[in-house]
Image (cartoon, coloured by chain):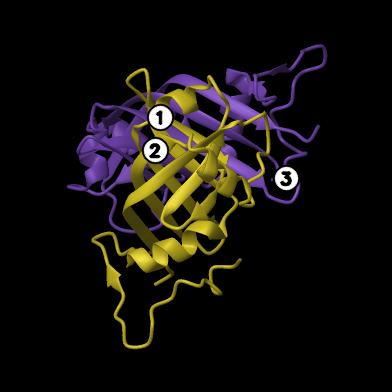
Chain colours: A yellow, B purple
């Protein structure tokens, strides 16, 4: 996807808003539209009181981000029940344009068999490892910014 | 840069190590070599007790990551004196390969005039906003992983 054919443009008559840095403030709807357009996002959590961040592939299911983690991994342990951030972005160094979306919400390990069965049918194939934990991040807050050339 | 001409390959005779997920564990030297190869990284901090993450362009200066932030911004406030994480990565969805490097360290706002003068000569031009704060993250910990096709 290029930045110009982004699905998240303002409807006719809507006025874009900008923050103090001159970045366009994206609406929740725009954030949700951009979220699934990239293959890899970054989950942000705390590990031994230090900030930690790990890239993961993911799918969006309703207002949830679904990722996989290995049993016994730091990610699986840290994400269980914690409030985490999940970030995606896309930047073009040539034009110095791009966008980022951050979702914040509680992460839970999915254990309900019916729900696991349903989620296992989503197109979420791990790129590495035997990732037998399914983690669901229910989106409570969305923040999106877009950098356009002025 | 493509993944194949990565500067961070093991020297002849060195044995690559892999983690439980099958990802190659990158050495500090490899992490430092990969860090400046991408234009945008993500600074991870805490904002009102919630995890926060913000993409920024940056330069690497010795064992420090240098970024800019706006006076009065949440990033400038949150990063002053805090231990933060700084993450860069590069993934190819077609080959499902890529790498990520995370640096953890204390962030400080640079106020020393001589140091500010020296840092202002580095090729760090903000993409947006009037970013008059210079933040230096002194790297204390490095973590890098590479995903190769098996």
* Quadrant of residue A84 within the rendered picture: top left
Tag 3 residue:
B2
- The lab-note entry on whether marks 2 and 3 share a chain reads no
Say which element carries label 1: loop
Say which element carries label 2: strand
Q: Is residue A127 left or right of residue B55?
A: right
Q: Position of residue B104 (x, y in %)?
A: 41, 25
Chain letter of mark 3 equals B
Q: Residue at x 41, y 26 (%)?
A: A78
- Quadrant of the image for the C terminus of chain B? top right
Check the image and report above or below for B105 versus B45: above
Answer yes or no: is residue B54 visible.
Answer: yes
Q: CA distance from mark 1 to mark 2?
A: 6 Å
Chain letter of mark 2 equals A
Q: Residue at x 50, y 54 (%)?
A: A60
Tag 1 residue:
A80
Answer yes or no: is residue A147 visible.
Answer: no
- Quadrant of the image for the N terminus of chain B? top right
Q: Position of residue A19 (x, y in %)?
A: 26, 63
Find out whether the residues at labels 1 and 2 contact each other: C-beta distance under 8 Å. yes
Q: Nearer the viewer, mark 1 or mark 3?
A: 1
Q: Is residue B111 left or right of residue A145?
A: left
Tag 2 residue:
A107
Q: Position of residue B41 (x, y in %)?
A: 47, 42
Q: Residue at x 67, y 43 (%)?
A: A125
- The lab-note entry on whether marks 1 and 2 share a chain reads yes
Q: Residues within 10 Å of mark 2 (few under 14, many from 20)?
A: many
């Amino acid at each position: 996807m290029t930045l110009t054919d982004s699905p998240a443009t303002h409807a006719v008559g809507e006025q874009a808003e900008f923050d103090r840095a001159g970045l366009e403030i994206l609406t929740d709807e725009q954030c949700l539209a951009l979220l699934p357009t990239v293959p890899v996002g970054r989950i942000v959590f705390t590990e031994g009181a230090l900030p930690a961040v790990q890239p993961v592939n993911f799918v969006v299911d309703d207002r949830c981000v679904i990722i996989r983690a290995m049993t016994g991994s730091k990610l699986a342990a840290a994400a269980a029940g914690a409030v985490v951030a999940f970030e995606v972005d896309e930047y073009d160094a040539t034009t110095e344009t791009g966008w980022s979306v951050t979702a914040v919400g509680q992460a839970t390990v999915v254990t309900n068999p019916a729900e696991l069965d349903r989620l296992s049918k989503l197109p979420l194939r791990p790129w590495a490892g035997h990732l037998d934990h399914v983690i669901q991040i229910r989106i409570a807050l969305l923040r999106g910014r877009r950098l356009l050339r002025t």
